[in-house]
Image: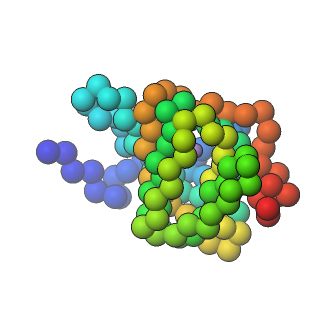
Amino acid sequence: MEHLPSRTQRWQPAGTEHFTGDVWLSDLGQMPDGSGLTMLGVQFAPGARTDWHSHPFGQTLYIVSGSGIVCDRDGDRVVVGAGDVVQTPPGVVHWHGARPDAPMLHLSLTTGGATEWEPERVDDADYQG
Ligand code: MN
């Protein structure tokens, strides 16, 4: 058994290539069973969000704390909070981030390989919906 206390986890800045605002990532690794399940903690400062993107096999988000927004290209937009789960289908272009007035921490669960980033950012008009 491996125990990684929260204080030992390494939060890395996500950078600005695919994110707007301050976002930090904690790579929780992959399951050792060969399933390719990738687990990632993602913290968003208030107002921070991803660029538009999709996941080849979809994504499950588990909201750990705070308050956020998940929105897809068709304008389906949900406000989420702690304990909520959002599943995005394979290939559906979407973004996720914190609300303007609160941070958000979510767990991201994916299989099937790397995130596919769209060329556009989530600008203020997209973000405000
Ligand atoms: Mn996503």
Name the one closer to the observer, 76 or 71.
Answer: 76
113 w.r.t. 14: above or below: above
Q: Which residue sits furthest left?
A: 1
Q: Residue at x 62, y 57 (%)?
A: 70
Q: In this image, 44 relative to 126: left or right? A: left
Query: At which x and y percent is residue 48?
Result: 68, 57
Res 64 visible: yes
Work out which quarter of the rendered image holds the N terminus and state it. Answer: top left
Q: Which residue sits furthest bottom?
A: 101
Query: At which x and y percent is residue 32?
Result: 25, 30
Name the one closer to the observer, 90 or 8.
Answer: 90
Q: Quadrant of ligand 1?
A: top right
123 w.r.t. 120: above or below: below
Name the one closer to the observer, 8 or 86.
Answer: 86
Work out which quarter of the rendered image holds the C terminus and state it. Answer: bottom right
Q: In this image, 69 relative to 30: left or right? A: right
Q: Residue at x 73, y 46 (%)?
A: 73
3 w.r.t. 31: above or below: below
Q: Residue at x 71, y 69 (%)?
A: 100
27 w.r.t. 105: above or below: above
Which picture quadrant has residue 126? bottom right
Name the one closer to the observer, 45 or 92.
Answer: 92
Q: Residue at x 62, y 72 (%)?
A: 102
Query: At which x and y percent is residue 62?
Result: 44, 57
Q: In this image, 93 relative to 81: left or right? A: right
